[in-house]
Structure formats: C-alpha cells, structure tokens
Image (cartoon, rainbow, N blue to C red):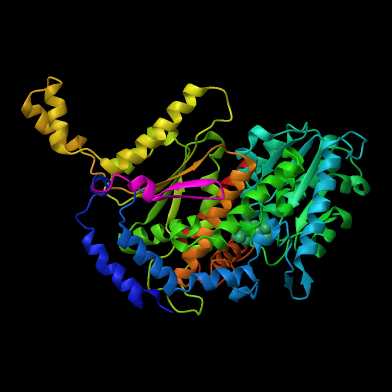
C-alpha cells in the first residue's frame, strides 16, 4: 500500500497548510496546560513532546495515519512471531530475549522461551565464573581482561550500554571493545594486554564479517606468538554466533559457543549473548535489570493507546517532520556523558533499519523514509554544532535525553547540565527576533545604526521542534527501556512507510567491491568488468606507496 495515497495522509497534507504560519510558542500561549497535555510516561520514561509544531488535530490525524497503516495489527504480528522480515523469511523477535515469562513462542518448531532461558542461564554461569576469577588462562592465571570483537550490531549495542552503565561496573575484569579492521585499533589494544589474562569474545551472527574475522585471527596469532600452545588457545576464546560450524572451524570449543538466532537482527541483539560482556563487567543482576526495562517498554508499547504510546508518538512526530516539513535529519542529543555512544547505536538502529527505498512488496517507496540520524553528547554540542540548529537554514529536529538525578555527587554540575539541556530546546523553539535584538543592543549602549546593521546576524528564527525524554536516573532498567523505545519507534515508522525494517541488503555491494579491490591491491586483476579510473588509479597509488613503506 502506498501510504501517501491514503485519506489519512491527504488530510495531514491539508492540515499542514494550517500550520505554515504558526509558531510553537503561540501554541504554548494559547494553552496554559500544553506541557501537561503533551507529555506522557511509559515504562518509567517521561516524554515531553509539547515543544512540537502539533495541535490536538495534528495528533489525531497522525494517529489516524497509524490506523490507516494497521499499526496495531502489525504490532501484534511482530509479537506473535510472524515472519515480518519477508525478504529473509524471518520473524523479528528481539522482544523474546527480554521476556521473563518466556511465553509459549514457537518458531519453526523451536521453543523460543526455553532456548532463551537456557542461553541466559549459560551467560549467568559463564559471567559468574569469570567475575569470581575462576576462569583461568592457559597458564593458570585468572582472566581479568575481556576483549569483545565484533562490529555493527555485534558491537554498538553492548559498547553503548557498557558506557551508559559505567557507574554499575562491578568486576575486577575490564572489557575492551574492538571493531575496526584498521590495524591501529587492534595493535594499540593488544600492546597493552597480557595474553595469559585475556579472554576474547568473538561476536558475529554470520561469523563471516571480514573485520571481525581478521581481528579474531590477529588475536589468535597474538596468543600463539606469546607462547600459548595451539591446544590451549580455546581457553582464551568464546564466540557468540548463529554460524556454529564456522566458529568451530575457527577453533572455538563447542561449549564456549553461545547462540544467536535468525529471529534477532544484529542491531536488535544486545539483549542476547551479544550482551555477554555486560554480564561479565556489570554482573548478571544488572543485565537482568536492563532486560526488565526493555520488557517494560515492550509491555507499554503493546498496551498503551496509540496517542499515549511513547514509541508511536516518537514515530509519528518523526514522520510529521520528515514527510510533511521536509526534515532530512534528526539529532539525538543525550545530556549525559555516559550516553555519548547512544547516537552511534541509534544511527545503526534507525538508518540500517529504515534506510530503504522499496516497499515490502518491492515497489519504489513514494515517500521519504529514514532521516540522517546524527548527534552527540550535550553540553559539548552547544560549543560545536548547535550553531546550525539555531541559525542554519535547514529544518532541524532533535531528541534531548536527560536524567533528573545524576550518578555523581556534583549537584551544581547536574543543575547546569539540566539547565543547558532545557535552554537548547527552548532556544530552538523560541528563537530571537530582530526587534528584540535591536532593543537589547541599543539598551546596552550601541547606537541604533550599528544595532540595525548587526541585528540580522544575531536573529534566531526558532520554531524548530524537539522532544525531551526524561529519566529519573540512568539506571539499567531505564537504559533498557530507552533503547527499546527507539527499537519500537523504528518499527512503527517502517510499518507506516511500508518498508521492511529488518533486512539490510544495501551493505552487500560494498563487501563485494571491497573483495575485488583487495585482490587488486594484492596484485590480482580486476574481476568485475568495467572499473572506473579513479578506483584503478588509487589502487595503483596505494600499491606504489605502501610497497615503498614495505621496502
Ligand atoms: O554489514 C552490516 C551488518 O551485517 C550488520 O547488520 C551487522 O550488525 C554487522 O554487519 C555485523 O554482522 P555479524 O554479526 O554477522 O558479524
């Protein structure tokens, strides 16, 4: 179905015209209770969406759009394990990883609940052994260093949560995250570690991702070069994968393997054994709390009315600006140093899920889909990219994320952090007009002609919308709920746009081309027909210069 041809969409197009001249500040002046009316709590997260260019009619029409897409039906289909990832003939059941009840969910004859429960029990046993110093390297030393090797969804989720919950680290074991194929990452890291005390967790759903395979091989060589015998290597490796055969072939012992399932997409997998490093460094109880928070958001998502449903509201507001105001990007700005990796995780979650241009039945999408997701930790952004938010000539939108209680004791710091966060959403909305600026300048002693000359440079147009998501504290439970919130937001947008949010065919071409270029870099012929002179020329330059460095 082409959503843009629905009556609901057409009504929104018409309604949009009524808002062309409206300002968000007007909407606040007209309704003293706007804040109360346009905010909602779900799974302990508070969403203030009052600083949006929406009226009650806007929201009604947006909710109608969700209805026109049969979003409620799609939600139930996902939670019932239907194979909604049609191009890969798979279900999308990341919610099952955090469902304590382990409802009777069968997929292709597998009892999902039992398999998830078994895996969690193994994760608890394994992490407890390591935390107790009972997992020993081949030389008998307790393991005190874990290196998580993975990339994309096999890396960003656990790394983001590990950073977010830094205050909950509770083990003598330290975990490093290794992703890039750039040798400077792995060589810098290994140069600082003791092989006898290091355990590698190779995380790869396919176990064929080049970067991960190369890093794992280098880790293996590093262990061997340190004198650890081939037979004893397995003490230093665990693996998390859906490809058991490839992992066994690499040399991972069978009982050191943890499963990944086809019904969990990589970017939705931190709740699985991909999160094993979190169990090791934070403790399984903390990991269980993380799961509980995500499950609480699942429950809210399934049960709340669409107009009081946090994922649905974020999804609809995003669609409002992308499809009716031409927003090309959306910024994620956590006012929390420990959440500084969140934008990167959400970039993959949103852009790899909804960076699509064909509908679920293969037709070209008639509407814009995922925006460019970007952002960075607040307050720092104020001294970096917020200038564009305030005086650029693009329509920009943002989610601000803040806690009311800090994980530290420096209350004045938290007061300023909170004040800065609200100042930015307020400035984006209010702006500052020319007359007000001239008045300000002249009352400060500037003569009127100078003030009139300078004023245009100081105008802030404003009327840029934003959401503010408030946690009381960045606890494991609230972080779980926060990430699940965005997972479900992405799902809702995909349903309304009519696209498949759970495949990622777009990444395959790069992999093919890289293999061909790698072969030419190493002296072989181009094997893919026509090759542009840029690629050919740069390969020649690389071969010349890198060989000169080799000499
Ligand atoms: O190439 C993209 C991608 O497949 C992501 O979807 C995935 O999270 C990442 O690479 C890693 O894949 P794997 O877990 O199979 O190594």
Q: Is residue 357 visible?
A: no
- Residue 528 in the image, given as x and y percentages of width and height: 57, 71
Residue drawn where x is 58% and y is 70% of the image: 76
Quarter of the figure with residue 129: top right
- Residue 50 in the image, given as x and y percentages of width and height: 36, 48
Answer with left or right where residue 411 lies relative to residue 287: left
Answer with left or right where residue 219 lies relative to residue 55: right
**Ligand 1 lies in quarter:** bottom right
Residue extent of the magenta highlight: 30-49
Who is closer to the viewer here, 539 or 389?
389
- Residue 18 in the image, given as x and y percentages of width and height: 22, 61
Magenta stretch encompasses residue 467:
no
- Residue 157 in the image, given as x and y percentages of width and height: 62, 49
Q: Residue furthest top?
A: 445
Quarter of the figure with residue 106: bottom right
Residue drawn where x is 34% and y is 57% of the image: 327
16 in relation to 343, above or below: below
Residue drawn where x is 30% and y is 38% of the image: 427
């Amino acid at each position: 179905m082409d959503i843009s041809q629905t009556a609901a969409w057409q009504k929104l197009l018409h309604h949009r015209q009524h808002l062309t001249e409206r300002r968000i500040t007007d909407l606040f002046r007209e309704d003293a209770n706007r804040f109360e009316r346009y905010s909602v709590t779900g799974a302990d997260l508070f969403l203030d969406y009052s600083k949006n260019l929406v009226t009650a009619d806007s929201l009604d029409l947006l909710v109608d759009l969700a209805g026109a897409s049969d979003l409620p039906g799609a939600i139930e289909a996902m939670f019932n394990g239907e194979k909604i990832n049609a191009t890969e003939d798979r279900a999308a059941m990341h919610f099952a990883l955090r469902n304590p009840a382990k409802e009777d969910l069968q997929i292709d004859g597998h009892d999902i609940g039992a398999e998830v429960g078994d895996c969690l029990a193994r994760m608890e046993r394994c992490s407890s052994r390591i935390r107790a110093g009972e997992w020993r390297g081949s030389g008998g030393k307790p393991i005190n260093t874990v290196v998580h090797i993975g990339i994309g969804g096999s890396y960003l989720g656990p790394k983001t949560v590990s950073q977010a919950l830094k205050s909950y680290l509770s083990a003598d074991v330290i975990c490093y995250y290794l992703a890039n194929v750039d040798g400077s990452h792995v060589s810098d890291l290994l140069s600082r570690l003791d092989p006898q005390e290091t355990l590698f967790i190779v995380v790869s759903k396919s176990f064929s991702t080049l970067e991960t395979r190369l890093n794992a091989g280098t880790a293996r060589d590093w262990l061997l070069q340190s004198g650890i015998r081939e037979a004893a290597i397995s003490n230093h490796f665990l693996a998390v994968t859906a490809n058991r055969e490839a992992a066994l072939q690499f040399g991972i012992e069978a009982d050191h393997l943890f499963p990944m399932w086809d019904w969990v997409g990589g970017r939705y997998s931190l709740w699985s054994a991909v999160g094993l490093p979190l169990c090791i460094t934070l403790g399984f109880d903390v990991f269980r709390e993380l799961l509980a928070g995500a499950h609480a958001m699942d429950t809210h998502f399934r049960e709340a009315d669409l107009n009081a449903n946090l994922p649905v509201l974020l999804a609809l507001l995003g669609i409002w600006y992308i499809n009716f105001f031409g927003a090309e990007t959306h910024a994620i700005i956590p006012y929390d140093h420990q959440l500084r990796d969140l934008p990167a995780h959400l970039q993959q979650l949103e852009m790899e899920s909804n960076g699509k241009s064909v509908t679920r039945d293969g037709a070209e999408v008639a509407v814009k889909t995922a925006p460019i997701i970007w952002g960075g930790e607040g307050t720092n952004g104020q001294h970096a990219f917020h200038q564009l938010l305030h005086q650029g000539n693009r329509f920009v939108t943002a989610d601000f994320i803040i806690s009311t209680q800090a994980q530290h004791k420096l209350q004045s710091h938290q007061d300023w952090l909170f004040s800065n966060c609200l100042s930015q959403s307020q400035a984006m909305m209010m702006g500052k007009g020319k007359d007000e600026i001239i008045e300000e300048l002249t009352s400060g002693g500037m003569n009127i002609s100078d003030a009139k000359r300078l004023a245009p440079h100081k105008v802030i147009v404003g009327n840029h919308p934003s959401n503010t998501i408030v946690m009381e504290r960045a606890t494991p439970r609230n972080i779980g709920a926060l990430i699940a919130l965005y997972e479900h937001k992405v799902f809702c947008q995909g349903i309304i746009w009519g696209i498949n949010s759970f495949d990622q065919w777009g990444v395959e071409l790069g992999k093919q081309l890289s293999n061909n270029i790698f072969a030419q870099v190493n002296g072989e012929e181009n094997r893919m027909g026509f090759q542009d002179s840029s690629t050919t020329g740069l390969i020649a330059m690389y071969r010349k210069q890198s060989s000169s460095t080799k000499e």
